[in-house]
Amino acid sequence: MDRRTFVTGAAAVTAGISAPFLSLGRAAAQSNAKYFSGVTSDGEYKFKSTNFAAVDKRWQRQMVKYFSSEPEGTVVIDTNHHYLYWIWENNTALRYGVGVGREGFQWFGRANIARRARWPRWVPPEEMKLRQPSLPDAVEGGPNNPLGPRALYLHTPKGDTGYRLHGTTAPWSIGTDASSGCIRMFNEDAIDLYRRCPNGTAVLVLEHIADRA
């Protein structure tokens, strides 16, 4: 199968939304507290601001030299190296650190952003609920929603892929294989990408592209 073809199989497709970090043990919560600092207001909600001083610089949003044949404005995602690139001009790109699907839930291919949502509602797929029976039927938009403040929905000509680019309640998971297929970002980065990518934006997901940067 060509790496630009979406991985098929019901498990990979229907489990496309990231599993949430709805609860943490006390020790884990204390350890992860360093990733937050203050709050950010966004419309009707406020969310915990990411403490980027605690984040490895390689996962922080930055302009980098990048060589690509993709047109400006394309989103290119390197799942192997945990980077998302927004292609800019003169062989440069804005690079974001991301969390990606763990083994068995990864996917690769071309799609387009067909829908964009502010403070999206999250509905776990039935297959995910079978694996995690404690999950709720739905989580309304808000600061405790695992999709964070923004979600970008990926479609192909065949319809909704089930995969999204979105924020996270777990900033420590950026740079890891932690999700059920979706691409998670720091909340601040999800908001930034939302502003840059209108409906129709092309998205390309490949396994090995970071070596070009």
Image (cartoon, rainbow, N blue to C red):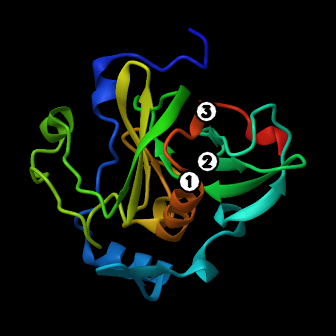
Name the residue tied to disc 3. Answer: 204
Q: Residue at x 56, y 53 (%)?
A: 98
Which residue occupies the extreme bottom position in the image? 38
Q: Are marks 2 and 1 in contact (CB under 8 Å)?
A: yes
Label 1, label 3: how far apart the Cα atoms are: 15 Å
Disc assigned to residue 56: none
Question: SS class of the residue under badge 3?
Answer: strand
Name the residue tied to disc 2. Answer: 82
Question: SS class of the residue under badge 1?
Answer: loop
Name the residue tied to disc 1. Answer: 98
Which callout, 2 or 1, points at the residue further toward the start of the chain? 2
Which amino acid type is marked by label 1?
Val
Label 2 crowding class (10 Å Cα cut-off): few <14, some 14-19, many 20+? many
Label 3 crowding class (10 Å Cα cut-off): few <14, some 14-19, many 20+? some
Which callout, 3 or 2, points at the residue further toward the start of the chain? 2
Residue 124 left/right relative to 179: left
Quarter placement of the N terminus: top right
| Residue 71 x/y as whole percent | 75, 36
Which amino acid type is marked by label 2?
His
Q: Residue at x 40, y 60 (%)?
A: 150
| Residue 38 x/y as whole percent | 44, 91
Question: SS class of the residue under badge 2?
Answer: loop
Which callout, 1 or 3, points at the residue further toward the start of the chain? 1
Say which quarter of the image contains residue 79. Answer: top right
**Is 20 drawn above or below residue 44 in the view shown?**
above
Which amino acid type is marked by label 3?
Leu
Which residue occupies the extreme top position in the image? 1
